[in-house]
Image: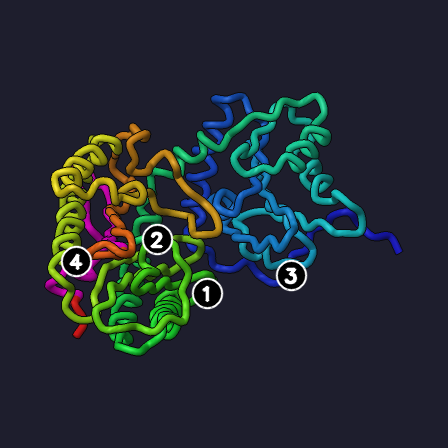
Amino acid sequence: MQRPDFFTLHNGDKAKLPFSRNEYENRLNALRAAMAAKQVEAVVFTSMHNIAYYSGFLYCAFGRPYGCVVTQTRCVTISANIDLSQPWRRSVDENVIYTDWRRDNYIRAVQSVVGSAKRVGTEFDHLTLEMYGKLQAAFEGASIVDIAPDVMKLRMVKSAEEIVLIKEGARIADHGGEAVREAIKEGAREIDIAMAGRDAMELEIARSHPDSEIRDSWVWFQSGINTDGAHNPVTTRKLEQGDILSLNTFPMISAYYTALERTLFLGEPDKRSMRVWQANVEAHELGISLVKPGSKCCDIVAEINELFASHDLLQYRTFGYGHSFGILSHYYGREAGLELREDIDTVLEPGMVVSIEPMITIPEGQAGAGGYREHDILVVGEDGAENITKFPYGPEHNVVA
């Protein structure tokens, strides 16, 4: 039997993708203009976020390489045979399936699309040394250049269709937050409370976005000492009266991430905890007021830093004050050029979407111990910014009796 290195198979019909055909064409046209400016003839994407952004297909690697090759005339996803035609159904254009009969059939499939290109773009921030070496060998005589920073800048400004989806995500994050808040009670476990929020979000995604992939939504719900880090895992710890709580809901709609994060208390907080919480809320509100077109990321950070310093709390800050939104999750993606940190001088412009999420952590053993964080999502417009997070924040709303 002759077994192919790669092949094409159109099993079934194309699925409904999260965006219109015109949206994907606009993205590809912008990419091709950037390719032409860098004299790049073909781009080989390997990351989940860029493959999904340009083709609609979000892969599940499970140890296998995936790709999307873009030239001036083609957009072709490269997928493993284990997925058969699902990648074709969820790709806006072409798909090539590679087999595992021979080692490096993935590379051969990529070569079949790239052809004789003499200048090939890749993502240096995603490639392993092993894969970089294989691509160099495959494209002998060609220059391999980094396209990742250019592509990140393209992704940072959202289209109208993206903003509609992000607003839906924010709504569903709030919906999950309500389910979490309803489940909070003394003696309940973190995991049980988190599952209530996750179930509520997935059911709402299935109801309001029935053609989307139902995958990867999650909730982090932390209590007591477990609130000290923003990304601490859910545990089986049982809630106790007086606990500081951290609510974090993350609905995923077709690879698009949104988030709601809130500080709560089970019972009345003590005076020190209340002062720290109110200071963090003050920082949160200041940050929201500073998000507008023309503002520079590092300047926003400087003003919030000054406020925390005035409360003698700056030393307890744990990370930057916000980040971009779009195709990202805790598995993939990050638009590092649009983060609210001291070393980022990006100027906000209409179409950008950022969070404001100040967090300070008072170490265990000190008065007011715990992690305090609020998180809202803002869409930058022509004259200001729209806050699309509606779940209330602060002591007036989030002390649970």
Find disc 3 in the rendering and name its residue. Answer: 11
Q: Which residues are magenta?
A: 371-398
Which is closer to the viewer, label 4 or label 2? Answer: 4
Spot occupied by residue 101 in the image (x, y as percentages of width and height): 80, 51
Q: CA distance from mark 2 to mark 3?
A: 45 Å
Spot occupied by residue 268 in the image (x, y as percentages of width and height): 14, 68
Question: Residue 273 got which mark?
Answer: 4
Q: Earlier in the sequence, mark 1 or mark 2?
A: 1
The amino acid on which the numbered mark 1 sits, given as a three-letter code, is Ile
The amino acid on which the numbered mark 3 sits, given as a three-letter code, is Asn
Which colouring convention does the figure follow? rainbow
Left or right relative to 73: residue 192: left
Q: Earlier in the sequence, mark 1 or mark 3?
A: 3
Q: CA distance from mark 1 to mark 4?
A: 38 Å
Left or right relative to 257: residue 76: right
Q: Quadrant of the C terminus?
A: bottom left
Q: Earlier in the sequence, mark 1 or mark 4?
A: 1
In the image, is residue 200 above or below residue 141? Answer: below
The amino acid on which the numbered mark 4 sits, given as a three-letter code, is Ser
Can residue 203 be seen? no
Image-quadrant location for residue 294: top left
